[in-house]
Amino acid sequence: MKMRSSSCGIDGCKPDRKTVERNRRIHMKGLCFKLSSLIPPHHHLHRSNKVTNQPTTPIPPPLLFVSLIRDKDKRVRHRFFGVC
């Protein structure tokens, strides 16, 4: 009869799913804060500045910023190179 291998190794026991998930959420939260810190403050949307004609799911500020930079890049490329 074979013995089942345990999840404990030389370094100790493997963390349970709850701990792994908690660490993952903490890591993702840190990445979100880093991403939001890269966006200039004047590009953040504030709740008081909302327009009433917005869709039911507003576009997140990072996506708005990326689309703004993409449009600016297209204009610059068109101006200097004549192509998009």
Image (tube, rainbow, N blue to C red):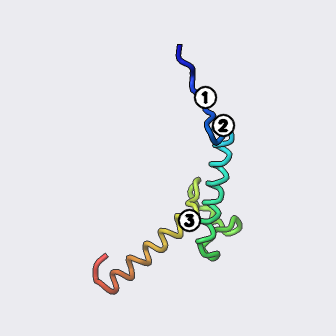
Quadrant of image for the C terminus: bottom left
Mark-to-mark CA distance, 2 and 3: 39 Å
Coordinates of residue 35 in the picture (x, y in percent): 59, 65
* Quadrant in the picture for residue 70: bottom left
Task: Say what amino acid the circle numbered 1 marks.
Answer: Ser
Task: Say what amino acid the circle numbered 2 marks.
Answer: Cys
Mark-to-mark CA distance, 3 and 1: 44 Å
* Quadrant in the picture for residue 52: bottom right
User: Quick one: label 1, few (<14), some, or many (20+) residues within 10 Å?
Assistant: few
Determine whether, in the image, residue 73 is placed left or right of residue 32.
left
Coordinates of residue 49 in the picture (x, y in percent): 67, 69
Coordinates of residue 22 in the picture (x, y in percent): 68, 45
Q: Are marks 2 and 1 in contact (CB under 8 Å)?
A: no
Q: Earlier in the sequence, mark 3 or mark 1?
A: 1
Q: Please identify the residue farthest to the front as the structure is shown.
A: 10
Which residue: 33% across, 81% down?
78
41 is higher (above) or lower (below) than 3: below
Read off the residue under disc 1.
6
Which residue: 28% across, 78% down?
83
